[in-house]
Amino acid sequence: MKKTKIFGTLIFALAFMLAGCGPKAMEVSPDSKFVTMGLDYENLKKVMQDMIESLMQDPYVQKIKTSNPRVVAISDIINDTTQKIDVESLSRELTRAMRKSGKFKLTMAMARGGASMDGMIQDVRNMRNNKEFNQYTTTEEGTLVAPTLSLSGRIGQSVHRMGETKKVDYYILLTLTDIKTGVVIWDNQQEVSKMGNANLW
């Protein structure tokens, strides 16, 4: 009986030790240099930094006064790649910098595929004439501010194979358009290229 207990204890201890020696999950720093064939965090971060710099140096933007900021709506940003990309996070990275400049404001009352609308804006307006709500506390008509500019874009890729080597070229295009005239006031395209073993990727 004692031998059985000792044997069982040894098995349990051995299993515990083996589990401790197995692979463990690791926290990855955003600054870690992991290379993949897809667009990674570092790629997109660099792309957006270059986009922001290009936009802020544009002559049109430099003429905008902070006393009269332009209202921007996020339109369609098409992801035409095989990779799942959070296009809203991408577009909001740019509009966040735009708002910080004091020259732009972002509307959440309307948006297309590149962002999400704030549904509460319309829900609150549906309270009008609802007897359950004090009508003096509801939002009156004519208070929404229409956008003057539209931000749209496209993320594309092209794949090339040369023997056992695979090369993927990504391009990110963003465009800022005057809604009233339909005229493009700024656009910028950034490219990212990746190369690796075609048998591994």
Image (cartoon, rainbow, N blue to C red):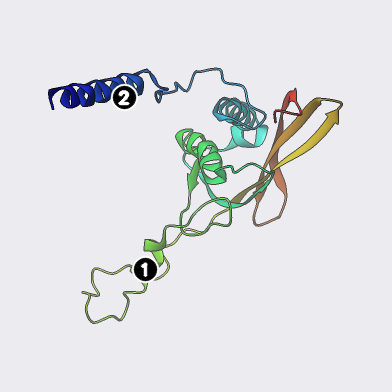
Which residue is more in the foreground, 58 or 85?
85
CB of mark 2 within 8 Å of CB of mark 1? no
- The number of numbered discs placed on residues in the rendered structure image is 2
Q: Is residue 140 visible?
A: no
Mark 2, Cα crowd under 10 Å, few <14 / some 14-19 / many 20+, is: few
The residue pinned by badge 1 equals: 123
User: Can you give x and y, in whole percent of width and height, for residue 14 in the image?
Assistant: 30, 20
**At 42% across and 22% down in the image, what residue appears?**
23
The residue pinned by badge 2 equals: 15
Q: Secondary structure at mark 1?
A: helix
Which residue is more in the foreground, 151 or 4?
4
Amino acid at circle 1:
Asp
**At 72% across and 41% down in the image, what residue appears?**
156
Disc 2 to disc 1, C-alpha distance: 57 Å
Amino acid at circle 2:
Ala
User: Can you give x and y, in whole percent of width and height, for residue 59 in the image?
Assistant: 66, 32
Which mark is nearer the camera, 2 or 1?
Answer: 2
